[in-house]
Amino acid sequence: MAIRKIVIYPAEILEQTCKPVEKFDKKLAKVLDDMYDTMIEYDGVGLAAPQIGLDARIAIVDIDDELGTIEMVNPRVIKTEGEQTGPEGCLSFPDLFGEVTRPNFVMIEAYDRKGRKYSLEAEGFLARAIQHEIDHLDGILFTTKVTRYLEEDELKGVESE
């Protein structure tokens, strides 16, 4: 396990569409383990491969709920519904937070570290975190969706994704 360096904006890789993962092997498992350690070290709730300099469709989310860590390899959004607006941050944009509107419900399909396909439905904050990370894999940054930036005193309890 290793803590990887977080890629900070304006690094080019953050705005690129990532390549699909084709090999489900020990190297992928190590990347996922490193991503988890890195996310915890930097106090995030999600992390995408380009945020550690990798051009691969890999992301994780862990919002400290009963689901634990969600590993998403080659994730695809199947369906979204509703709307929610709330604060978001990003480990690649230290100390920057903004209000973002996203669907309140998301259904995704993805693969786990062993190459098994699964689908997942999420609502609320988990749906927000999943969509934020999948956006990273498509080179879409939360700053392109911010309706207004937040001041430090508005940030009580906001976590970075």
Image: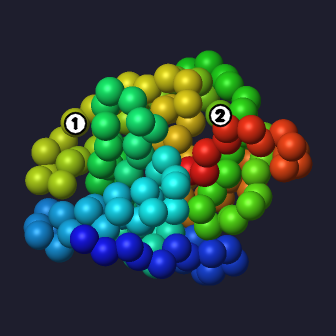
Report whether 137 appears left or right of 89.
left
The answer, for residue 22, to whether it is visible in the render is: no
What is the three-letter code of the residue carrying label 2? Arg
Most foreground residue, 154 or 72: 154
Say which label, 1 or 2, has the lower sequence index: 2
Q: Position of residue 123 (x, y in %)?
A: 50, 23
Residue on which disc 2 sits: 102
As helix, strand or loop, the secondary structure at mark 2 comes to: strand
The answer, for residue 98, to whether it is visible in the render is: yes
Residue on which disc 1 sits: 118
Circle on res. 128:
none
* Image quadrant assignment for residue 141: bottom right
- Rendered position, 36 above or below 11: above
- Rendered position, 141 above or below 128: below
Q: Position of residue 37 (x, y in %)?
A: 35, 62
**Is the N terminus in the top left, top right, bottom left or bottom right quadrant?**
bottom left
Q: What's the residue at 32%, 49% (across, down)? A: 72
Most foreground residue, 21 or 93: 93
- Rendered position, 69 above or below 56: above
Q: What's the residue at 41%, 76% (across, down)? A: 4
As helix, strand or loop, the secondary structure at mark 1 comes to: strand
Report whether 37 appears left or right of 77.
left
Q: Position of residue 84 (x, y in %)?
A: 68, 25
How many residues crowd mark 2 within 10 Å: few (<14), some (14–19), many (20+)?
many
Q: Position of residue 153 (x, y in %)?
A: 86, 43
Q: What's the residue at 41%, 36% (across, down)? A: 64
Q: What's the residue at 74%, 38% (across, down)? A: 156
Residue at the far top in the pictured view: 82
